[in-house]
Amino acid sequence: MTNTPSPYHPLLRFMAKVVSYIFHPLFVPTYIFLLLMLLVPYEFAGITPWQLKLRLFSVFWLTAFFPAFAVFLLWRLKFSESIFLRTQKERIIPYIITMFFYWWMHYLSRNFADQPAVLKFFYTGIFMATAAGLILNNYYKISLHGMGMGGASMAIVLFAFYYHQPMGLVIAGALLLTGIVATSRFLISDHTQKEVYMGLLVGGLCQAVAYFFVM
């Protein structure tokens, strides 16, 4: 079977790939933690700068490196045909592994008094989104990028409500990036519009529900 040539310019597709890699959903928790370090540094007053860097590294280690390494192992052990998880079946085990690490971050966040309280609902929200994604994966291949960026955008809006701070520029930037990432997925992936929009909806809704119950 021959592949249908892409109607988009190669440079445009290359840029879309770069955007998709930079804003991969596994990196979202690290970006959110870094954003809070910049926006509300006083929330980390109880720890030293070195400890704060270690905390940031631990977030990346648990929410990005370990899940990504698990996907790599599944690919090398022939449990999946591609490291990009192109089919619904290939996504089942990575969903479960990522759920575990997100649950662990949720569990740890309940006992930390030296970091922003909003991380409690954020980690709960991404755990809920991953669980919802696993369930919906039985019916169609919901966009992981959509869930990640939708959740991040909603979380930033809720940060503004919680801290009563004017974060208009940050929110606008988050929404702009969400639109760019969603467009990139349309350009280079086999997702339908429904799958991308449902990803955005699920990610944002889970953050809103987590905020309501946790905060």
Image (cartoon, rainbow, N blue to C red):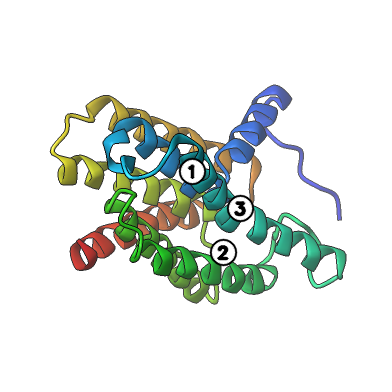
Q: CA distance from mark 2 to mark 3?
A: 26 Å
Q: CA distance from mark 1 to mark 3?
A: 15 Å
Mark 1 or mark 3: which comes first in sequence?
A: 1
Circle 1: residue type = Gln
In the image shown, does 195 or 7 lie closer to the viewer? 195
* Residue at image point 52% right, 70% down: 99
Decide if residue 8 is in sight here.
no
Which type of secondary structure does the marked residue at label 1 adopt? helix
Decide if residue 130 is in sight here.
yes
Q: Indicate the position of residue 69 as horizontal and vertical percent values.
A: 73, 58
In the image shown, does 199 or 83 lie closer to the viewer? 83
In the image shown, does 78 or 211 lie closer to the viewer? 211
Q: CA distance from mark 1 to mark 2?
A: 39 Å
161 over 41 or under it: above or below: below
Residue at numbered disc 2: 141
Residue at numbered disc 1: 51
